[in-house]
Amino acid sequence: MRFYDINAGSILIDGYDIREFTRHDLRFMFGMVLQDTWLYNGSIMENIRYGRLDATDKEVIAAAKAAHVDSFVRTLPNGYNMILNEEATNVSQGQKQLITIARAILQDPKILIFDEATSSVDTRTEVRIKKAMDNLMKNRTAFIIAHRLSTIRDADLILVMNHGNIIEQGNHQELLAKGGFYANLYNSQFEVPKAV
């Protein structure tokens, strides 16, 4: 996204060097769903619409349905018109994350960045978020930064990093077959702790 310009080589989007785009135009191509959700004091409808300010209510609701937001919003007082308080503490962390995914669906970006999007939610909520992420990732490039390996299992290419360096790459099955760092990390989540 050119927060830092590269000093060697090039990064291409559809064959064009990213330095040929203005930062504004380049960043417009990206949608981001971060670990720390950013919602503002306003209605749920307005928070989702922030992804594309000219969206109709119908388009906002369609994005909410694709992000698995609609079902819980309809149970809230005032539904889509419910006002999120200043810290958005009147919805759960998982619900906040789903709202930000709905916002990204509405934006319809070419490229997505999920940065630890499931790290601060429980396992059941993670499944709902993963389904919403799958809907959002259809037919587009997505970068998923995650420590929870269940989030990246289905990725076409996994880059395994350790101390800032890429040490392995491949898909989930290939990395398990290598029996290296990724396989050890993945298998460690199934180990039973020894009794003390």
Image: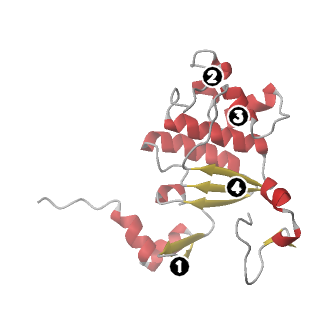
What's the residue at 63%, 49% (across, down)?
33
Q: Gap in Å between the C-alphas at discs 1 and 3?
A: 36 Å
Q: Gap in Å between the C-alphas at discs 3 and 4?
A: 16 Å
Residue 171 occupies which quadrant of the picture? bottom right
Q: Residues within 10 Å of mark 3 (few under 14, many from 20)?
A: many
> Residue tagged by mark 4?
112
- Whether residue 37 sits left or right of residue 61 in the image: it is left
Dividing the image into 4 quarters, which one contains the C terminus? bottom left
Q: Gap in Å between the C-alphas at discs 2 and 4?
A: 27 Å
> Residue tagged by mark 3?
48
> Residue tagged by mark 2?
83
Type of amino acid at the residue the image marks with label 4: Leu
Dividing the image into 4 quarters, which one contains the N terminus? bottom right
Residue 142 occupies which quadrant of the picture? bottom right
Q: Earlier in the sequence, mark 3 or mark 4?
A: 3
Foreground disc of the pair 3, 4? 3
**Disc 1 on helix, strand or loop?**
strand
What's the residue at 17%, 62% (across, down)?
194
**Disc 3 on helix, strand or loop?**
helix
The x, y position of residue 180, in whole percent, is 42, 78
Q: Gap in Å between the C-alphas at discs 1 and 4?
A: 22 Å
Q: Earlier in the sequence, mark 2 or mark 1?
A: 2
- Whether residue 32 sits left or right of residue 92 in the image: it is right
> Residue tagged by mark 1?
165
Foreground disc of the pair 2, 1? 2
Q: Gap in Å between the C-alphas at discs 2 and 3?
A: 12 Å
Q: Residue furthest top?
A: 78
The x, y position of residue 147, in whole percent, is 47, 60
> Given contact means CB atoms under 8 Å apart, are the residues at marks 2 and 1 in contact?
no
Q: Earlier in the sequence, mark 1 or mark 3?
A: 3
